[in-house]
Image (tube, rainbow, N blue to C red):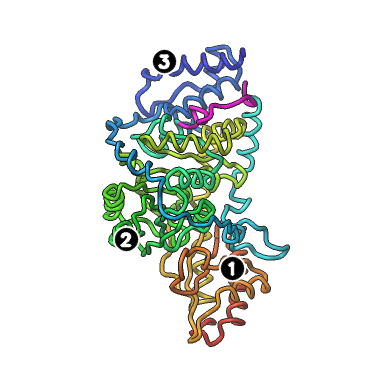
């Protein structure tokens, strides 16, 4: 108890003194704080980390701690009373049998056989994960007073505050629930928002893990096509009118698998269409921290400008940190938050406190900013290496969009008169020593063409990517000879 009170007391003293510094002003060094307050360096580190989590202080590797820029004024909440009508529609249509098909998810989770290059993975290669920073954060978290006790069911307040600041100035900790990763958050959201048998509007193509969750909940996914600028608003409007759906799931930023970013002119339109239909938009913001360093400024999340509670926002630390750091967040406003909370508690009680404490230690450390910058550069370099290798080895594979974020490319296979069997290409690629993902699981209806997804985030580096594409060319030569030609340069 003594150390906990020392950290709290020091954090309180520093908090009360922040007004002495202008925004961006440098705080005293750790050594100076140790001498002045007669506390240990560990106590100083934890107190600073607490202020970082509260958004009052930022740290810069090698430079120290600085007063953060003030948050913009929070706009007043909008009208969420419409949610009472939408959430009461549990009498729904005829129930659809629940099916659990994990094949599309297992493609990206299963480890390939020895010697096979992994271009189908859904997570960062181990060389891109902040393993040392994670180990240090977990060790510090385990020593925190109360770290192995029962956490609040909604999650640690400091962690909820950190996620709220990441999403946008209109949200606070009270709007956020901590979840066991993004997949768990999606499952909770879909069960909360739609009764079994209800239609669910989804982007086409879209993330197979979300489709699996929807079908397991007895929902009926209905495709809404996307193009290079994201979901097409006129088709979204038509789908709401035709189906009576009350939920639309989308990935506005670096959509999986296409890599598309929802165009500025479409963002407000999507919210307007959903609001007119009395529907929710589930925003899966999985790739925001997988941005490449040549992307330019990113649009804010849809949830950042949503006073009426149309958007239920999902994000996690898993993609950018480690598959085993299963810490994510659900953010919502209005009555729907109560239903999300109830399902979360029934399903899992709470996210283990040591993981939440480790997440706080990680994002509050100087190593976090260094990791984000490192990954941003590395993903850009891997993407460039893969596009160059494809242009050299497989020019007949169409690449309609080169993303500035995420970790994969979405390619269209050449079609023969009788049609191309993408599963045959996937099988031949595995025999040639490279694992790739078929396109079919990304569609909830008939796909328009044979396609494959190649991950550059899961590869060890440029050399492995180049070798993987050479092996893929061998597979394509075997299966696609005569299917459009031009496979070899």
Q: Is 56 situated above or below 476?
A: above
**Residue 292 in picture, x, y percent from top left:** 45, 53
Label 2: state its secondary structure: helix
Sequence-wise, the earlier of marks 3 and 2 is: 3
**Residue drawn 32% across and 41% down?**
85
As drawn, the label of residue 228 is none
Marks 1 and 2 close (CB-CB < 8 Å): no
Rendered image quadrant of residue 324:
top right
Which one is closest to the eye, mark 1 or mark 2?
2
Kindly give the residue lying farthest to the right in the view shown.
114
How far separated are the C-alphas under marks 1 and 3?
55 Å
| Observer-nearest of 311 and 216 | 216
Question: Which label number is shown at residue 466?
Answer: 1
Left or right relative to 471: residue 85: left
In 3D space, how far apart are the residues under numbered discs 3 and 2 (Cα atoms)? 57 Å
Which disc, if any, is residue 16?
A: 3
Q: Are marks 3 and 2 in contact (CB under 8 Å)?
A: no
Q: Position of residue 52 (x, y in %)?
A: 47, 29
Q: Indicate which label's residue lies in the foreground, 3 or 2.
A: 2
**Pointer 2 residue:** 242
Magenta residue check for 203: no
Mark 1 to mark 2 CA distance (whole Å):
46 Å
Pointer 1 or 2: first along the chain: 2
Magenta stretch prevailing secondary structure: loop
Up the image or down, 342 lies above or below 241; here it is above
Q: Looking at the image, which residue is at 51% across and 35% down?
A: 178
Mark yes or no: residue 343 visible.
yes
Image spot of residue 145 (x, y percent): 62, 21
- SS class, disc 3: helix
Q: Nearer the viewer, residue 239 or 427?
A: 239
First-in-chain label (1 vs 3)? 3
Range covered by the magenta-colored residues: 144-160
């Amino acid at each position: 108890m003594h150390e906990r009170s020392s950290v709290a007391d020091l954090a309180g003293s520093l908090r009360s003194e922040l007004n002495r510094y202008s925004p961006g002003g440098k705080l005293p060094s750790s050594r100076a704080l140790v001498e002045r307050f007669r506390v240990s360096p560990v106590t100083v580190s934890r107190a600073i980390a607490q202020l970082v989590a509260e958004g009052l202080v930022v740290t810069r590797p090698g430079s120290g701690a600085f007063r953060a820029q003030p948050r913009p004024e929070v706009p007043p909440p909008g009208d969420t009373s419409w949610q009472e009508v939408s959430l009461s529609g549990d009498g729904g249509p005829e129930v659809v049998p629940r099916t659990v098909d994990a094949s599309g998810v297992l493609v990206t989770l299963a480890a390939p056989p020895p010697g096979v290059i992994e271009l189908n993975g859904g997570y960062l290669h181990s060389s891109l994960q902040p393993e040392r920073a994670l180990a240090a954060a977990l060790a510090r978290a385990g020593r925190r007073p109360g770290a192995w006790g029962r956490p609040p069911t909604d999650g640690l307040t400091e962690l909820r505050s950190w996620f709220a600041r990441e999403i946008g100035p209109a949200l606070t900790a009270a709007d956020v629930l901590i979840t066991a990763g993004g997949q768990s958050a999606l499952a909770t959201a879909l069960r909360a928002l739609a009764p079994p048998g209800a239609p669910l509007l989804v982007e086409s193509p879209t993330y197979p893990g979300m489709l699996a969750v929807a079908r397991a909940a007895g929902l009926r996914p209905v495709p809404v096509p996307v193009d290079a600028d994201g979901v097409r608003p006129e088709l979204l409007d038509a789908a709401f009118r035709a189906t009576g759906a009350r939920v639309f799931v989308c990935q506005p930023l670096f959509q999986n698998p296409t890599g598309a970013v929802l165009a500025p002119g479409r963002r407000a339109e999507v919210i307007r269409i959903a609001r007119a239909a009395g529907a929710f938009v589930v925003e899966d913001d999985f790739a925001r921290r997988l941005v490449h360093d040549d992307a330019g400024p990113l649009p804010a999340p849809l949830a950042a400008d949503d006073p009426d509670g149309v958007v239920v926002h999902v994000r996690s630390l898993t993609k950018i940190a480690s598959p085993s750091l299963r810490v994510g967040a659900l953010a919502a406003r209005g009555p729907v938050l109560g239903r999300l909370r109830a399902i979360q508690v029934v399903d899992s009680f709470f996210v283990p406190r040591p993981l939440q404490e480790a997440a706080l230690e990680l994002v509050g450390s100087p190593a976090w900013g260094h990791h984000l910058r490192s990954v941003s550069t590395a993903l850009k370099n891997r993407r460039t290496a893969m596009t160059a290798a494809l242009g050299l080895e497989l020019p007949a594979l169409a690449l309609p969009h080169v993303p500035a974020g995420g970790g994969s490319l979405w390619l269209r296979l050449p079609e023969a008169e009788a049609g191309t069997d993408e599963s045959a290409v996937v099988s031949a690629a595995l025999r040639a020593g490279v694992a790739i993902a078929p396109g079919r699981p990304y569609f909830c209806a008939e796909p328009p063409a044979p396609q494959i997804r190649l991950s550059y985030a899961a590869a060890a580096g440029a050399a492995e990517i180049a070798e993987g594409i050479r092996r893929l060319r061998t597979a394509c030569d075997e299966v696609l000879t005569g299917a459009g030609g031009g496979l070899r340069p």
